[in-house]
Image (spheres, rainbow, N blue to C red):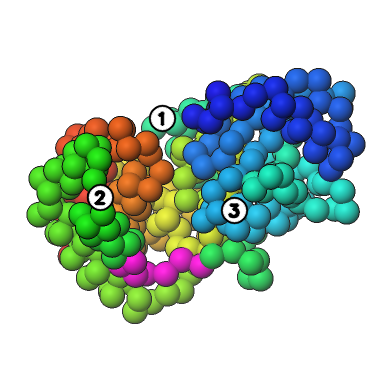
């Protein structure tokens, strides 16, 4: 079993075959890596070293995964050594196909995911190295100030209401109905902040989107891994999650200044991302989590989850 999917010896053997065909690599052992959110991830021990193998089976995410690899390659070529080095497949390709998945291979990083208040200084310093290397031309998404995340959520909600229902579906609907007023408030605020932010869509950079959740420490070194969601976006996309704290906003702004990046976090953009991500995670819960788990996860998220302090902060922004 891996990522909730049964993988037998035959599957592992076929993975070994494709690694040999694509990389000339003889895999001695392939074991679950249990890293990342979307992908199926493996640790590969081979004759030439240890590697991280990511297999993306989700059609809606595969294109973004493929697109991100050229950015990671560019960063590595510019001397960034903390993003996970890509191993090229035959014909210098950055990815390969296997069954219905897109696969990518990286050097293995020994370490553990760590995110605390104390790691933010190093995280922001590392992100500034990425921001300084921003250049146009990558075939990756560009952020937009819109309320699409809320609209998508409401479409999912309506679909759930009108479709044949399991007990799990009914439990989800009950939770959403309980928080209907709060959800409506956040949707209204998102629409207003999006309109305000669209008045100035300048100063977009290469952003990670969840650097703190992918901050690894190992062998005395720091890493920011999993660049699948890399995007041209305002810096608030990376700063919003801690932006409700005065000390974190100051630290982010001070780090930008020290690194020669002429930008200061804008309150309206921070607020926009708080509401946008509120709906982003609701959409994720509805789309990707097991039915039996959805209602509990959504209830915890809306009742006592970390998102509440972010929304409380965003509500203070005019």
Seen in the image, is 239 located left or right of residue 38?
left
Comes first in the chain, label 3 or label 1: 3
**Residue at the spot 64% in from the left edge and 41% down from the top edge:** 55
- Residue 267 image-quadrant placement: bottom left
> Which label lies toward us, 3 or 1?
3
Q: Residue furthest bottom?
A: 199
Percent coordinates x, y for residue 252 in the rendering: 42, 49
Percent x, y of residue 146? 34, 70
- Residue that badge 1 annotates: 116
Tell me residue 316's x, y (percent): 17, 56
Q: Quadrant of the C terminus?
A: bottom left
Q: Which residues are magenta?
A: 142-148
Q: Secondary structure at mark 3?
A: helix
Counting residues from the start of the chain, the first of labels 3 and 2 encountered is: 3
Circle 2 Cα neighbour tier, 10 Å, few/some/many (<14 / 14–19 / ≥20): few
Determine which residue is flagged by label 2. Answer: 164
Marking on residue 62: 3
Few, some or many residues within 10 Å of mark 1 (<14, 14–19, 20+): few
Closer-to-camera residue (173/269): 173
Disc 1, SS: loop
Establish if 27 lies above or below 311: above
Q: Does the CB distance between marks 3 and 2 fall below 8 Å?
A: no
Depth check: give the residue in front, 309 or 97.
97
Identify which residue is drawn at 44% across, 31% down.
115
Q: Secondary structure at mark 2?
A: loop
Sequence-first disc among 1 and 2? 1
């Amino acid at each position: 079993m891996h990522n909730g999917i049964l993988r037998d010896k035959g599957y592992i053997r076929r993975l070994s075959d494709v690694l040999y065909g694509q990389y000339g690599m003889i895999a001695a052992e392939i074991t679950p890596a249990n890293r990342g959110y979307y992908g199926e991830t493996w640790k590969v021990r081979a004759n030439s070293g240890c590697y991280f193998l990511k297999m993306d089976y989700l059609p809606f995410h595969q294109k973004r995964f493929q697109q991100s690899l050229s950015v990671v390659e560019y960063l590595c070529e510019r001397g960034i050594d903390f993003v996970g080095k890509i191993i090229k497949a035959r014909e210098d390709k950055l990815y390969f196909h296997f069954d219905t998945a897109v696969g990518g291979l990286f050097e293995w990083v020994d370490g553990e995911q760590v995110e605390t208040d104390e790691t933010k200084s190093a995280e922001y310093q590392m992100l500034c190295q990425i921001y300084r290397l921003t250049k146009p031309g990558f075939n990756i998404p560009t952020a937009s100030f819109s309320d699409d995340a809320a609209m998508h959520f409401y479409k999912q909600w309506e679909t759930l209401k009108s479709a044949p229902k399991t007990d799990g579906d009914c439990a989800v609907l009950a939770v959403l109905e309980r928080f209907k007023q709060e959800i409506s408030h956040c949707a209204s605020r998102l629409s207003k902040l999006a309109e305000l932010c669209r008045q100035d869509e300048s100063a977009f950079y290469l952003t990670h989107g969840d650097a703190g959740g992918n901050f690894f420490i190992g062998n005395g070194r720091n890493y920011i891994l999993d660049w699948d969601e890399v995007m041209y976006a305002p810096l608030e996309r990376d700063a919003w999650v801690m932006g409700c704290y005065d000390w974190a906003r100051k630290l982010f702004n001070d780090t930008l200044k020290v690194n020669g990046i002429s930008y200061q976090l804008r309150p309206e953009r921070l607020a926009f991302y708080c509401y946008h991500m509120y709906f982003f995670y609701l959409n994720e819960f509805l789309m990707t989590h097991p039915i039996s788990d959805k209602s509990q996860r959504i209830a915890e998220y809306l009742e006592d989850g970390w998102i509440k302090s972010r929304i409380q902060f965003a509500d203070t922004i005019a």
